[in-house]
């Protein structure tokens, strides 16, 4: 919350010059899901979408007085909802002293302004709401820069109608505008300058991130990325696997900034596990673009683990949403090949549901029932990760001169020595290597490669 008590965290999209009869410190919220016919995933129920919108609203510490869906057969260009719905909501806003109405849907600047006039209170849409959450949760420099860039991009689109309370005058050939026009241009110029600066700063941060990524490529440890729908339990699982202390809360978007820690696999091999931002249905375009650099950690991962809240009634719909974002990021091949699915929160299932899950997991071979809360199934999950890593490795039979200490050290550092027999002058070895490392070794030491298995 900002100092004036509004729901915004530094990005106020209120129309300039307008005042509301209710106090600005009023945190009482009404959540309205726009159930637009033919829009959105048909596999999701209205109740589930309303519940998610309520959770998003509560994530910025607003008190939700009520949350419900409103059927929209034909969206109204000026106010989205029909006249009857607008009037009923206006009565509810007055009766319950609502300080902010959250519309779970996309509002144009005109629709937002008109609804604020009709309801005499602040109105934000789904994009604005998610931007608020991200603004409150981002901790790293890159995260804060990304959120501000996304927010300013969103705010810029709302400038067109923001100054209609000022007189607009056009004279001559239209080259000179009235005070409203001048204010819009001034605001747009200020925002454009700030956006340009943010993009420059993000470019510098990304250079540092790319450098770190290159250094990790030189290290022998593979990267395992945890992805999943928001609040699926990724951070709890991350903490369990790595003994880290990443913030974990039962709320949407508890984690925004990526965190990486070491983990020991069952066979003794070390790996790096990465906790990433949670996905959500209808993720605003601005945020997908802004966080693409952060999510590039997923692109570089050796193994992707999809953490699912298997006890959630919309778990299948959430799975499809996550896979859609992954495809958008460019890892569609990994999705098609079958991700490792950590079916989390099995401790919330009853006996029959758990038995059904076990049977389904046995058939698919990619699902691992587990509970980050209790620790059940985590050994099996790590084993599945190790198996996936081994499956993509190449096994080389090598004959290395004992005098070539550098080559021997490189193989131990970069690969996994499965077998070794030392003769008088040579070491006969069978080594498992990442495909890139196997090719690199063959290029440098072709004479030492006896055969490939």
Image (spheres, grey):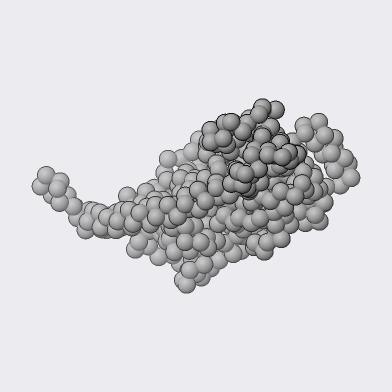
Q: Nearer the viewer, residue 13 or 345?
A: 345
**The furthest residue to the right:** 351
Quadrant where the C terminus is found in the figure: top right
Q: Residue at x 10, y 47 (%)?
A: 172
* Whether residue 182 is situated above or below residue 352 in the rendered picture: below
Q: Nearer the viewer, residue 329 or 383?
A: 383
Left or right relative to 391: residue 109: left
Q: Nearer the viewer, residue 426 or 104?
A: 426
Q: Residue 341: x percent and y percent?
A: 71, 40
Image quadrant where residue 321 sits = top right
Q: Nearer the viewer, residue 254 or 336?
A: 336
Q: Residue at x 75, y 50 (%)?
A: 268
* Whether residue 235 is situated above or below residue 279 in the rendered picture: below
Image quadrant where residue 362 sits = top right
Q: Is residue 50 visible?
A: no
Q: Residue 401: x percent and y percent?
A: 64, 39
Q: Residue at x 30, y 56 (%)?
A: 193
Left or right relative to 265: residue 440: left
Q: Residue 350: x percent and y percent?
A: 86, 47
Image quadrant where residue 387 sits = top right
**The furthest residue to the left:** 172
Q: Residue 3: x percent and y percent?
A: 47, 72
Q: Residue at x 57, y 54 (%)?
A: 258
């Amino acid at each position: 919350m900002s100092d004036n008590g509004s729901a915004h965290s530094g990005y106020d999209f209120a129309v300039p010059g307008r005042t509301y009869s209710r106090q600005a410190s009023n945190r009482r919220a009404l959540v309205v899901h726009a159930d637009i016919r033919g829009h959105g995933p048909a596999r999701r129920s209205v109740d589930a979408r309303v519940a998610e919108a309520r959770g998003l609203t509560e994530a910025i510490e607003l008190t939700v007085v009520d949350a419900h869906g409103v059927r929209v057969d034909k969206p109204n260009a000026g106010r989205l909802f029909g006249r009857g719905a607008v009037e009923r909501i206006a009565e509810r806003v007055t009766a319950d002293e609502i300080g902010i109405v959250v519309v779970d849907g996309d509002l144009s600047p005109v629709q937002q302004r008109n609804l604020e006039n009709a309801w005499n209170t602040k109105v934000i849409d789904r994009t604005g709401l998610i931007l608020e959450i991200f603004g409150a949760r981002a901790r790293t420099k890159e995260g804060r820069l990304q959120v501000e860039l996304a927010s300013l991009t969103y705010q810029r689109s709302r400038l067109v109608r923001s100054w209609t309370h000022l007189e607009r005058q056009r004279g001559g050939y239209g080259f000179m505008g009235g005070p409203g026009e001048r204010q819009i241009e001034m605001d747009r110029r200020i925002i454009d300058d700030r956006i340009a600066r943010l993009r420059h700063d993000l470019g510098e941060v990304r250079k540092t991130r790319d450098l770190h990524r290159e250094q990790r490529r030189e290290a022998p440890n593979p990267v395992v990325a945890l992805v999943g729908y928001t609040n699926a339990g990724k951070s709890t699982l991350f903490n369990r696997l790595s003994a880290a202390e990443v913030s974990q809360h039962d709320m949407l978007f508890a984690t925004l900034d990526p965190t990486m820690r070491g983990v020991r696999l069952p066979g003794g091999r070390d790996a790096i596990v990465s906790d990433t931002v949670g996905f959500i249905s209808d993720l605003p375009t601005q945020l997908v673009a802004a966080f693409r650099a952060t999510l590039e950690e997923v692109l570089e991962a050796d193994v992707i683990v999809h953490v699912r809240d298997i006890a959630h009634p919309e778990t299948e719909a959430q799975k499809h949403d996550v896979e859609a974002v992954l495809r958008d990021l460019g890892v569609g091949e990994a999705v098609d090949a079958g991700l490792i699915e950590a079916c989390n929160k099995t401790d919330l299932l009853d006996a029959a549901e758990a038995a059904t899950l076990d049977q389904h997991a046995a058939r698919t071979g990619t699902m691992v029932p587990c509970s980050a809360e209790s620790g059940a199934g985590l050994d099996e999950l790590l084993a599945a990760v190790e198996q996936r890593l081994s499956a993509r490795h190449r096994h080389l039979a090598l004959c290395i001169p004992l005098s070539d200490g550098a080559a021997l050290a490189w193989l131990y550092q970069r690969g996994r020595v499965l077998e070794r027999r030392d003769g008088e002058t040579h070491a006969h070895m069978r080594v498992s290597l990442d495909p890139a490392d196997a090719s690199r070794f063959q290029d440098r030491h072709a004479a030492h490669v006896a055969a490939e298995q």
